[in-house]
């Protein structure tokens, strides 16, 4: 069994960021799939016509090792539907790259799982999108919930790290508390929460999408479950499109380390996505049409990573690329519009993201709310986007007061512009200790609650001192008892 | 709490989530200590007073979170 790392290998050092190391790579090994998910962005089902051969995959592994990759998530479709998937796992592990597979778990049989364990697989993430009735309906296969749970149990019994990813859509909230009980019961220790994004099949089934104003109900529920989970050994991981800078940011983004906050999309900087035919993107989720940086059959992986403008878009982005509400947001410079995939899929251009708790609260404060409405269907190709409109309406009477279709959009980057040679370390925000909202360093009065920042910090420091003293005394007494 | 020579890793949405991450911060540590202390409490009453102080601090920290 592989040795367990002491902390996530995905954590980034300043050196990783400055050197644009693709620390975490998400690799779609095949688009073949045994589920029929109503929200699948890649429209998985049949394998791509020109998927990489085993030899080509092994060359990719060598290239990733040279680039300094430390973790690879194998995805699909279903990665296990490739006969050579264990060969690829073995090659990754030979370079000590942490390797885990994200799966629906329908046919990850005892034999398949054991062969992956023997090859050195480190972990398994299973997708559970609700309790049985909702999950089976959304995943398009009766019995898929039970298969997924069985896979989790088997993977845990095999000694693998196990986790769950849950997509939250319009129908999910009611299932979340019971789902958490199930996840704790099977012994998973991390639970990633993410919003269903308007791509591929989810555009066809747009009733599955959460409305942005529904974040006002969802986020307090998630915060409660986060808290309960911590106490019971399950850590909720809020995904890249659970955003941003609302009242729970200081609790969950850093798992209690309040210095950690959202710091912008990492696509093409420390994250890479590879499609089964060798197409390389800055993030696996992004639309292929707009974000394909090249193909490993045409260029080396290093050439694509270092030289492709479509990969580099994130390295060049600034406030100039934001529009709509995000453009003038207090957090614009740090946030940069949240998850690029979410906003690009919705509106065709990143940089204006209505799926933001801070934004929803600001609108609510003004008596407004936002909802999305489909304007155009998506093509039937993998990772295809449609088009949606963000409508701002008065809560009181539903009158629409603004539409994203009428807002000025940023100009596209000059694709000839060279990417910066050195990555920028994201700025760190301070925390107002009176209201627990993040503030730009140097503020003397909190722009959110009006508190005196220094006075609130002093009071907080005194509370921290009391906590430390209380912990020290209990630790001292426990140590004395244990030594007897 | 670990000094940050590191930044939290990204959480792309088609990927496996971050394995081996753990809860940080005073509240998580205090709760763990409370759990440890309560296990000993039945046999060792002398930890009770310190535990009460700890519980008070947990309550204060929890109420501030909400």
Image (cartoon, coloured by chain):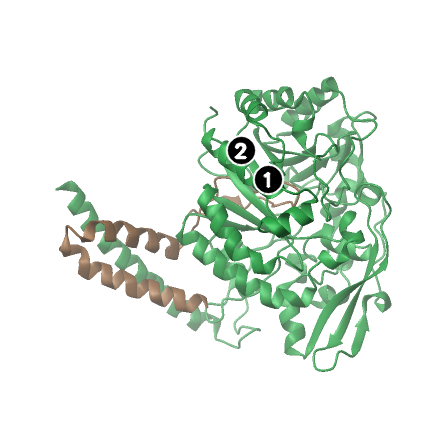
Chain colours: A green, B brown
Which residue lies most toward the left here? A484
Q: Read off the residue under disc 1.
A: B16
Write the residue at 67% across / 56% down: A338
In this view, the residue in front, A365 or A446, is: A365
Q: Residues within 10 Å of mark 1 (few under 14, many from 20)?
A: many
Q: Is residue A252 visible?
A: yes
Q: Residues within 10 Å of mark 2 (few under 14, many from 20)?
A: many
* A403 horizontally vs A150: left or right: right
Write the residue at 55% across / 56% down: A176
Which residue lies most toward the bottom here? A396
Q: Are the two marked residues, 1 and 2, in contact with CB atoms closer than 8 angstroms?
A: yes
Instruction: Tell me: residue A177, above or below residue A157.
Output: below
For residue A178, the mark is none
Residue A87 location in percent, x, y? Answer: 63, 19
Q: Read off the residue under disc 2.
A: A123
Q: Is residue A350 visible?
A: no
* A345 horizontally vs A117: left or right: right
Instruction: Tell me: residue A298, above or below residue A477.
Output: above
In this view, the residue in front, A238 or A232, is: A232
Chain identifier of the residue bearing label 2 in the image? A
- Secondary structure of the residue carrying numbered label 2: strand
Residue B48 location in percent, x, y? Answer: 18, 59
Q: How many marks?
A: 2
Write the residue at 77% across / 42% down: A43
* A280 horizontally vs B30: left or right: right
- Secondary structure of the residue carrying numbered label 1: loop
Which residue lies most toward the front here? A142
Write the residue at 72% across / 19% down: A54
Quarter of the image for the C terminus of chain A: give it: top left
Residue B13 location in percent, x, y? Answer: 65, 46
Residue A179 location in percent, x, y? Answer: 53, 51
């Amino acid at each position: 069994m592989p040795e367990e790392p002491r902390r996530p290998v995905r954590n980034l050092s300043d050196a990783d960021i400055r050197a644009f190391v693709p620390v975490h790579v998400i690799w779609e090994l095949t688009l073949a799939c045994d589920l029929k998910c109503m929200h699948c962005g890649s429209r998985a089902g049949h394998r791509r016509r020109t998927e990489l051969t085993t030899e080509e995959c092994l060359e990719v592994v060598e290239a990733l090792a040279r680039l300094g990759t430390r973790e690879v998530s194998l995805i699909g479709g279903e990665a296990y539907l490739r006969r050579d998937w264990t060969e690829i796992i073995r090659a990754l592990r030979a370079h000590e790259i942490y390797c885990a597979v994200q799966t629906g778990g329908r046919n990850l049989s005892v034999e398949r799982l054991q062969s992956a364990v023997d090859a050195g697989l480190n972990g398994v993430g299973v997708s559970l999108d609700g309790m049985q009735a909702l999950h089976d309906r959304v995943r398009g296969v009766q019995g898929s919930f039970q298969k997924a749970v069985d896979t989790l149990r088997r993977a845990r019994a095999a000694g693998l790290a196990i986790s769950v990813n849950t997509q939250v859509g319009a129908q999910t909230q009611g299932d979340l508390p019971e789902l958490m009980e199930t996840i704790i019961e099977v012994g998973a220790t991390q639970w990633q929460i993410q919003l269903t994004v308007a791509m591929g099949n989810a555009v066809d089934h747009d009733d599955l999408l959460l409305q942005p104003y529904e974040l006002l109900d969802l986020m307090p529920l998630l915060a409660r479950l986060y808290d309960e989970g911590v106490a019971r050994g399950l850590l909720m991981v809020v995904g890249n499109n659970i955003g941003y800078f609302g009242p729970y940011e200081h609790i969950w983004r850093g798992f209690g380390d309040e210095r950690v906050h959202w710091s912008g999309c990492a696509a093409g900087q420390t994250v890479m996505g590879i499609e089964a035919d060798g197409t390389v993107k800055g993030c696996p989720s992004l639309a292929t049409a707009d974000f394909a940086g090249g193909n490993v059959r045409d260029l080396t992986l290093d050439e694509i990573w270092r030289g492709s403008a479509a990969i580099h878009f994130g390295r060049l982005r600034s406030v100039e690329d934001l529009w709509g509400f995000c453009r003038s947001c207090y957090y614009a410079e740090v946030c940069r519009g949240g998850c690029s995939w979410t906003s690009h899929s919705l509106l065709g251009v990143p940089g204006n993201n209505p799926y933001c708790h801070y934004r929803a609260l600001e609108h609510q404060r003004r008596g407004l709310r936002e909802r999305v409405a489909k304007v155009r269907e998506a093509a039937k190709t993998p990772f295809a986007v449609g088009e949606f409109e963000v409508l701002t309406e008065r809560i009181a009477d539903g009158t629409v007061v603004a539409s994203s279709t009428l807002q000025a959009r940023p100009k596209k980057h000059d694709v000839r512009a060279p990417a910066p040679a050195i990555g920028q370390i994201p700025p760190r925000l301070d925390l107002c200790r009176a209201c627990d909202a993040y503030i730009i360093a140097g503020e003397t009065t909190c722009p959110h609650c009006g508190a005196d920042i220094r006075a609130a910090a002093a009071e907080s420091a005194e509370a921290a001192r009391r906590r430390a003293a209380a912990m020290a005394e209990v630790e001292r007494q426990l140590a004395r008892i244990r030594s007897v | 709490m670990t000094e940050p020579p590191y930044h939290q890793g990204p959480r792309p949405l088609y990927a496996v989530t971050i394995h081996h991450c753990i809860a940080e911060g005073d509240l998580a540590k205090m709760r763990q200590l409370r759990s440890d202390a309560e296990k000993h409490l039945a046999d060792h009453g002398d930890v009770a007073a310190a535990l009460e102080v700890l519980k008070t601090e947990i309550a204060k920290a929890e109420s501030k979170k909400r």
